[in-house]
Image: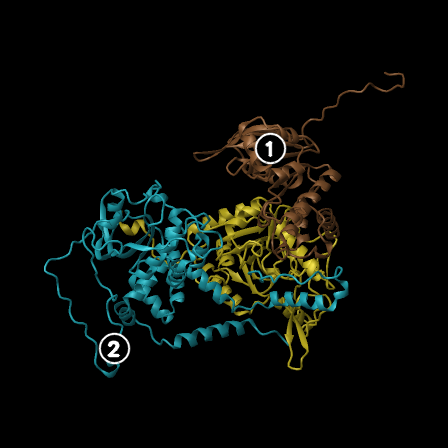
Chain colours: A brown, B cyan, C yellow
Amino acid sequence: MTALGLAPPTLVTAPPLLVLEGVTKSYGPVPALRGVSARIWPGEVLGIVGESGSGKSTFLRMMHLEETPDAGSYMLNLPGTPGNLFDLDRYDRAQLRARHIGIVYQNPHQGLLMKNSSSGNVAERLLIAGERRFAILREKARGALDASEFPLDRMDAPPIELSGGMQQRVQLAKAIALEPAVLLLDEPTTGLDVSVQAAVLDTLKRLQRDRGISMVIVSHDLGVIRVMADRVMVMRHGIVVEEGLVDQVFQDPQHAYTQQLVHAKL
Amino acid sequence: MAYVATRGGERAIEQAERLYRARMGTIDAARVAEIEAALPALVDRVMGEASLYARDLAALALAQTGGDIYEALLLLRAWRTTQPRLQVAEPIAPDGTFTHRRISAAFKDIPGGQILGPTLDYAHRLLATEVLDGMPHVPPPVTPAEAPCHATHPSLAAWQQAQGLLQPPDPVAVDRNEIPDLTREPLLFPAKRAHSLQSLARADTGGLLSLGYSAMRGYGNAHPTVNELRLSEAELRVAHPNGTVFSAGRVPVSQAEVVTTRGKDGLRLGFCATLGWNEIKVIAGATLDLNAPGAAKGSPVEQEFVLYHTEPVEASGFCIHFKLPHYVTFQSALDNLRAARANAAEAWGAPGPAPVPQEEPAE
Amino acid sequence: MTLSDLARPWRPFSYGFLDASAKREIRRKLVKAIAVPGCQIPYASREVPIARGWGTGGLQVTCTLVTPGDTVKVIDQGADDSVNAASIRRFLARVSGAATTLDTTEATLIQSRHRVPEERLHAGQTLILQVPNPEPLRPVMPDMSIARQMHADADYGRLWLVLYEQMVRTGRVMLGAAYPSLVNGRHVMTPSPIPRWDVPKLHMADHLTILSAGREKRIFAVPPHTRVEPLVFDDVPYRVEEHGSLTCHKSGLRGYFMNELPQPDGTALHEVSDSHLGEKAIRRAEGEDVRIAETWYRNGELAP
């Protein structure tokens, strides 16, 4: 005890929120992932870069529990989620996914019901999680859309009638509706006009800061990673060739492939 | 003041049936024999769709229903339900059947030759109205060839497989008495191979034609070439419990193989066979069989879509069921409509913007 | 030993029309259906001498269950004298030798198209409902095989969304007959196209309800004392049709589900849909001693 009666300062190391170890997956003779590991700490943004065929999207699908790998483990450090998530059965995986993991796909058709209302798309998540009060569904849908900076006067418009940027905002609202521990984003702004990209990234950054959600952003666009991520993993042919703090990796890439990427794109 | 007595409904249906049957008048064995002799193609079609080989019963069903094919099918299938299952016969090898007609569009000539057999393909389709004027049409006799044709013909697909041209099918080893039977088990998807072939065998000819035609016009993913079309008679070989195998007679069967040349690993086959001779059905059916693998859900050639909607007894029954009273469900829907109009104030908040038009969900 | 010793005389059909193999399959599937309330169990479904879509599913179940000691009632839209009900009743009598009745209280087996009788059913009575479409997810998923997986995953979000969207667009739930209901807290089923008025009768009932779709080849069941809860938002109450205050112009009965009969002068009369209940009420009014059982609804409201 110090003179003031306080305990001496101790270094507090928060345990990682998400730990994936040795994830391996082949599709027939094609190895998509060859022992990929990753850790994500609470409140941080991890970027995953690579070109097509690197395995980054497959890895994201594993994180989203859409598929199980041939080998590897996946632990989520949250109350009530013990053990290797890859061992869960289909039903439990779906429940866990709905409750704790949000996702935004590159193609809004993949993540949204295009002909239902935008608020309905968000409400569906809440309904799956068991919310049965209509008033609460409206309120929470409105809240999530608002936080995603979606214009509320169009909250009941179906996504099919909206612009690309607005569709991504609906996806975002849907993803954060249950306040998940982690948000996965697969090329979230690819295909959008540059100015719209900037606006969506702005919203993402604000959300991340305000809510402290952990995020994993997969992108081939190093610019997006640089704006959004704290750390980055570089993938190539199913393995991680380099990882570290974004600034470090981009300013001082060690691996030849990273050097190539950075040189070409930044 | 009492309700309409139950008898009222029963009396009505009895008279309705009598009205229908009055059109056909007396049905006797002679009429049935005449139908069997005069309309072999129709009898064959009905046997195939009823999945029951019984010429006289098929002709009787047609006589009884006045030629309404769907009603005739229902009679035959319902009757079939009551019959005991004695045995599963020996498998039929197409190259062992007695050939009446065997052609291929894939090659100009094939081992065993192109056997035209009985067909109207090359006939001029002229209506013989002179028959109505009292001049019966007597068909000119067939001129026999110099040498009789072979009784059996080899399989072209076997030759193609030996050449390494054809993707070999994946055989499923199963005891003859364990073959999945569509009439004894529910059809679930993705369907077992036995179930899908059985389903095609007894499918509605018109239904297969419609959907097959859509595939031929590009709504599918594989354009067909007729590899081999066969109309033959197959020996029904059954085994006595003491082991003796004997023939219980011959049944006419038709089958078609169609190929697509666009497979990565060689020619890919589609197949369809049925009881009786029905070329349109087997060619269309084989085309749909060819198009099923890889077809997207919701496309007109996707297996679940095809097999569900080409079931003649189910399709026709459901179609005509819409004639049944539906006034209770109608009343329930009217109630909603009226309540929505009258109690707009009770509704929850302001309605949202005009929705994207939604289809009325199927019943 | 001769062939005639081994064989029995040929009969056109078995007892109850269906042969032993068909009945065995249906019995086994019924046991499964009762063991997993509300879950659709696929079955082969034989053709029977009425057209598909006209009650072959209900008929196959009744034929499987019927014994010579049973008493069978058959109704369509609530009426015994409907042509379809009359036709089915005749067939059942012919193939089973069982007694038939118009009186709900006397029946052991009740085969019905789209109505549940108004008089409460008791243990020992079985209600067999004819089902045209067994799949409650059809409006959001026409593909039966995908819908089947959705039931296995309890993936009902898109069905709930139908209710949500109706609330957003019109301020009320617009589902009519065949209201999707959660059975035993696990499977969502369609109760068949019975009106909303009838769905509460299935909840925690004393009787067994079997639902059978012949054409679509699915059987499902609600065992006695099982929860059947229409899908509703907690803050938007379930509404039955507003028939509580209607009066039957023939029998004077009030507060039961009615048929609307448009009149030439532009008005409408009503008659009670449960036709034999109406008849009993008339006969009682004329002095006859008829037995009318306790009804689920009293004074137009669901009795507790």
| Number of numbered discs visible in the structure rendering | 2
Q: Which mark is in front, 1 or 2?
A: 1
State the image coordinates of residue A109 (x, y, percent, origin top left). 58, 50
- The residue at the far right in this view is A4
Badge number at residue C227: none
Badge number at residue A85: 1
- The residue at the far left in this view is B146
State the image coordinates of residue C79 (x, y, percent, origin top left). 58, 67
Q: Are marks 1 and 2 on the same chain?
A: no
Using the rendered view, name the quadrant where residue C170 is placed.
Answer: bottom right
Label 1 Cα neighbours within 10 Å, binned few <14 / some 14-19 / many ≥20:
some
* Cα–Cα span, label 1 and label 2: 77 Å
Q: As drawn, is B32 to the left or to the right of A12?
A: left
State the image coordinates of residue A256 (x, y, percent, origin top left). 53, 28
Q: Nearer the viewer, residue A149 or B204?
A: A149
Residue A81, relative to residue B272: is it above or below?
A: above
Give the residue displayed 48% in from the left and 65% down from the top: B319
What secondary structure is marked by label 1?
helix
Label 2 Cα neighbours within 10 Å, binned few <14 / some 14-19 / many ≥20:
few
Q: Is residue B172 visible?
A: yes
Q: Which residue is mark 2?
A: B128
Residue type at mark 2? Ala
Give the residue displayed 32% in from the left and 64% down from the top: B58
Residue C258, relative to residue B221: is it above or below?
A: below
Residue type at mark 1? Leu
Q: Chain of mark 1?
A: A
What secondary structure is marked by label 2?
loop
Residue B88, relative to residue B344: is it above or below?
A: above
